[in-house]
Image (cartoon, rainbow, N blue to C red):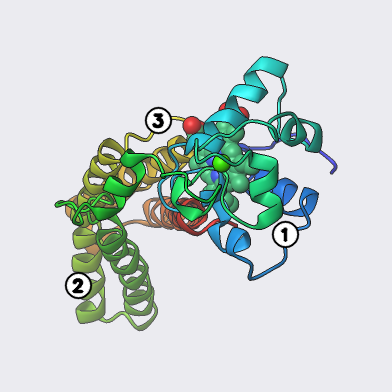
Amino acid sequence: MKRSHHRSGVLLLIALASSVASASGVYLDTFLSHYKIKDGSALAEKSCGICHVSDSDFKFNPFGKDVKKAMTDRNAEEVDAALLVSIENLDSDGDGTPNGKEIAAGTAPGDPSSGGAPGTKPAAAATEEAKKPAPFPPKNGFHPAIVHFPIALFIGGLVLDFLGMLRKDKTLLQAGWYCILMAAVTSLGGIASGVLAMGLQKLPYRGLIFTHLTMAVASSVIIWIMVAMRVHRHEKMNVPMRFLYYVLAAATFVLISWAGHLGGVFVYGE
Ligand code: HEC
Ligand SMILES: [Ca+2]
């Protein structure tokens, strides 16, 4: 891929975000293509959960831990076929069947309850984990439910605002103002619930999550600036002020969309 020089912070952020976002998808692709895993098979369905706890909890499972350890041991920058082969003889999940054999048999090498040598008891910890009732608050800290409020309110507010400006309609402008105000307020809830989810899942402040959080906080800050601009001037903004307002609005739109996209990548994979 051709790498052009970045022209602005936004472009740099976007580039950074997409490289982080694709790295995780690449590991999955490497695994699936190296072992020629068929679409729809149990392993393909496990997806990110082949190496992580699940496709929404990215702590490592025992197999993922061994993948990561092999990377460190070999000083490798990424997961490749040789690295996968190097851990085939390990029995990461301790169910009695080595990783290579499990993968060939279509069972998960990081999940002792997914199969393995007959008669071998799966590690107790893993089955207990499965029996636990759903925790409260849920591990996502209600984040997926809350984040849609600021996004929808902000976009709705912009549309109302814009229509109000075109039609010089006070009511529309006022509706837009309240939506944007509510977006600013609910964005704080979005950030708080996101940080709570990170705490509950013990996610590290780096990589995809860090980019996502940075973009979300930046969006929130800009929305608050927009609110402050309107509190002072309301509909009587002069032309340069109005221009700045809409530049900020556009920047927030990009940031919010990317933050949302990354959140999606994080939960569902590419
Ligand atoms: C073949 C094993 C494997 C698969 C499959 C896999 N990952 Fe990973 N993942 C890793 C490893 C190893 C790391 C650590 C990479 C590093 O340190 O460079 C990692 C790191 C991550 C991180 C960063 C966490 C951190 O500590 O910064 C996220 C997020 C992530 N993966 C998400 C995913 C998603 C989403 C998928 C599914 C699309 C996925 N992974 C599939 C092995 C895998
Ligand atoms: Ca095993």
Q: Is residue 139 above or below residue 46?
A: above
Task: Give the structural element (helix, strand or loop) at label 3.
Answer: loop
Mark identifier at residue 204: 3
Disc 2 under 8 Å from ligand 1? The reply is: no
Say which residue label 2 marks.
174
Can residue 169 be spotted in the picture? Answer: yes
Numbered marks: total: 3
Label 1 neighbour load within 10 Å: few <14, some 14-19, many 20+: some
> Quadrant of the rendered structure where residue 215 is?
top left
- Contact, CB < 8 Å: mark 3 with mark 2? no
Say which residue label 1 marks.
37
> Quadrant of the rendered structure where residue 176 is?
bottom left
Task: Give the structural element (helix, strand or loop) at label 2.
Answer: helix
Label 3 neighbour load within 10 Å: few <14, some 14-19, many 20+: few
Three-letter residue code for mark 1: Ile
Three-letter residue code for mark 2: Gln
Q: Is residue 234 left or right of residue 164?
A: left
Ligand 1, what quadrant? top right
> Quadrant of the rendered structure where residue 183 is?
bottom left
Q: Is residue 266 left or right of residue 76?
A: left
The structure residue drawn at horizontal position 52% and vertical position 43%, both measured from the top left corner, is: 110
Furthest-front residue in view? 119
Quarter holding the N terminus is: top right
In the rendered structure, which disc, 1 or 3, sits on the residue that comes first in sequence? 1
Q: CA distance from mark 2 to mark 1?
A: 55 Å
